[in-house]
Amino acid sequence: MKKIIVVFFVAVVAAFAGYGIHLFQPSTKLSDLVLANVEALALDETLPPVTITCGQNEGACWMRENLCMIGEYTGYSCAFSGDPMFNCSSPCK
């Protein structure tokens, strides 16, 4: 019985301590500018679709592949990837 009373007392003290800490936490107020920026970012903006045309030997849809040498210049040759996220230009044709 004595252990139950001690546990109950510790729980009550911990609850009051936690509530006291919560009350004295500084509250952060957001400025009107910050709130306007958050609202602007939350708006659904539909952008026009972007069409990426793959290049013939380099450019979009090409990625770096093998090391090549042109005179004193060392570069990479471009290999077709088909993925428009890649872009490669090279003096090695």
Image (cartoon, rainbow, N blue to C red):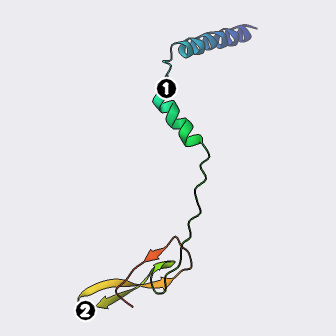
The residue that label 2 is drawn on is 71
What crowding class fits label 2: few (fewer than 14 Cα within 10 Å), some (14-19), or many (20 or more)? few
Q: In the figure, residue 74 lies in which quadrant? A: bottom left
For marks 2 and 1, the one nearer the N-term is 1
- Residue 86, placed above or below residue 80: above
The residue that appears at 54% across and 80% down in the rendered structure is: 81
Mark 2 belongs to which amino acid?
Gly
The residue that appears at 59% across and 41% down in the rendered structure is: 42
The residue that appears at 51% across and 33% down in the rendered structure is: 36
Q: Nearer the viewer, residue 72 or 55?
A: 55
- Residue 84, placed above or below residue 55: above
Q: CA distance from mark 2 to mark 1?
A: 61 Å
The residue that appears at 59% across and 63% down in the rendered structure is: 49
What crowding class fits label 1: few (fewer than 14 Cα within 10 Å), some (14-19), or many (20 or more)? few
Residue 29 position within the rendered picture, expressed as x and y whole percent measured from the top left: 49, 22
Q: Nearer the viewer, residue 2 or 52?
A: 52
Mark 1 belongs to which amino acid?
Leu
Residue 17 position within the rendered picture, expressed as x and y whole percent measured from the top left: 57, 12
Residue 7 appears left or right of 84: right
The residue that label 1 is drawn on is 30
Q: In the figure, residue 18 lies in which quadrant? A: top right
Residue 62 position within the rendered picture, expressed as x and y whole percent measured from the top left: 48, 80
